[in-house]
Amino acid sequence: MDFELKNLTRTLICSEKADALIMLVPEGLTAGDDALSLLAALAIKSGDLEVKPGKLLNAYRVPGIAATRVVLVGAGDASPKNIRTAVNAAMGDLKTSNAERAVLCLSALNALQSESVRAAVVACAEASYTYTTTKSKPVAAKLQQVLVAVDSLANAQAGFDKAIGLVKGIDLAKEWANRPANHATPVLLAGAAKELGKLPFIKTEVLGHKEIEKLGMGAFLAVAQGAAEPLRFIVLRYEGAAKAQAPVVLIGKGITFDTGGISIKPAAEMDEMKFDMCGAASVLGTFQALAELQPALNVVGLIPACENMPGDRAIKPGDVVTSMSGQTIEILNTDAEGRLVLCDALTYAARFKPRAVVDIATLTGACVVALGGVRSGLFSNNEALAESLSRAGESSLDLCWKMPLDDDYAEGLKTNFADVANVAGRAGGAVTAAKFLQRFAADFAWAHLDIAGTAWKSGLAKGATGRPVPLLIDYLLGQVLAAEPAKASSKARPVRKSTPAAKTRA
């Protein structure tokens, strides 16, 4: 979809030709003498339009307005959350129309902020997203162009640019998460990472079986040994700052399909286990967004990618494997495989001397029970890191919730036959999984995001959400300000030019 940002008064907006004109109407609307303002004011006065977020009123061929169709939508107090609600409602209303070009009017919002523009553009893109990759006759969304009209480019440009980068990252994450497992194998996932390596400041390295075996990643290898599809360990590097600046490491769980292995899952809804690589997809999406936004920091992405299958060489309950850290693990349940691939990736991450490590994984059904699909579970051994991620979740509208890591939760992981068991029973399952991972993150600031409830939706709306790409990007951009002083990168950084009308495709 093409997005364009333009400085337009409400009078000029009325003259803008389009199939649809969407006006966000806030509380305390300041009405002008233009046709659009008068229409909104009259609708509110007559009681036909509520300014409650998401409430709609449609009008057709309004005198004095060039757009064919006008959609007035309540935006409440015009907070980013309410703007998102309003845009989702308006875009949902247009989805069944023939509109190909729309104007999104934000000019009526008082004291428009950068984050408000970001929320509007991201919501617009998400509401119009359509998956087409494996359809024989793909039908693209009819709406192809959106002009975002504001009354001040100075207040809007940064949010618009950020939104475009985010949209591209979210779309990439959705694309790979939504693909069926036979169209998103570990090898194909590595190919997507190699494509990212062609973008500014990004380098990609892909390790195969021999290299992974040489590293001693026994836990990762154990999960993959029952599958015919070869495993891959993907290393992405975004180098936007001086080499002396310690990187943030992101680790994405990349189980491209999870049958549960010998501890096989029930057949119902097993197709959704193609989403078990949403953590990996979010890392790919985050790097796509980094290439667009080009912040001055260093980021490493690690993706252990494989399938978990019940083949004749598959690991069995009771098997003991040796992780890259040297710790031995008794595998009591082969369906608790994500923590096995992540623990070796956590050990590998230490070589980068990271300032922080964040792993992202669709790890436990227990987290879905605890938090549903609203917030991702956040676990951390570092309060400052946890606070930064929580703030990023709030600012990006990609919420998380800090969960406990009391040592008592690790009692269930004790075993007579290895250093640690890979499960500790059903009670507190999300926490005990995090306690398992914590054993491998003792040497750095670490956080774990359990996105099992937030990475995708089931039912009629089945599909990936792209979360937590927005949270990760807000966290990373926050680290630019917190970065210790370092010499500028020797690489030439492209300069973005601000123009009266900025146009881009996302």
Image (cartoon, rainbow, N blue to C red):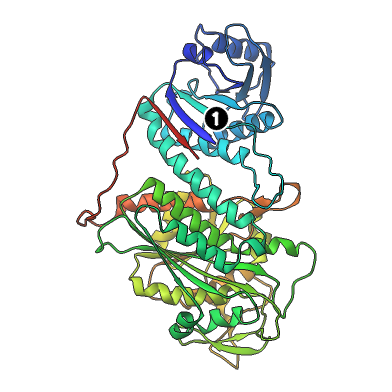
The residue at which mark 1 appears reads as 145
Q: Position of residue 287 (x, y in %)?
A: 44, 55
Total labels drawn: 1
* The N terminus: image quadrant: top right
Of the pair 159 and 448, the residue shown nearer to us: 159
From the viewer's perspective, tell me whether residue 262 is left or right of residue 489: right
Q: Position of residue 357 (x, y in %)?
A: 42, 66
Q: Residue furthest left?
A: 487
Instruction: Determine the residue positioned at 71% across, 72% down.
Output: 259
Instruction: Determine the residue positioned at 58% across, 81% down.
Output: 411
Q: Amino acid at mark 1?
A: Gln
Up/down of 435 relative to 200, above or below: below
Instruction: Determine the residue positioned at 48% across, 83% down.
Output: 210
Quadrant for residue 85, please give it: top right
From this viewpoint, is residue 472 visible?
Answer: no
Quadrant for residue 178, please give it: bottom right
Instruction: Determine the residue positioned at 41% across, 59% down.
Output: 197
- Crowd class of label 1 (few under 14; some 14 to 19; many from 20; radius 10 Å): some
Q: Position of residue 329 (x, y in %)?
A: 56, 86
Q: Residue furthest front?
A: 136
From the viewer's perspective, tell me whether residue 212 is left or right of residue 486: right
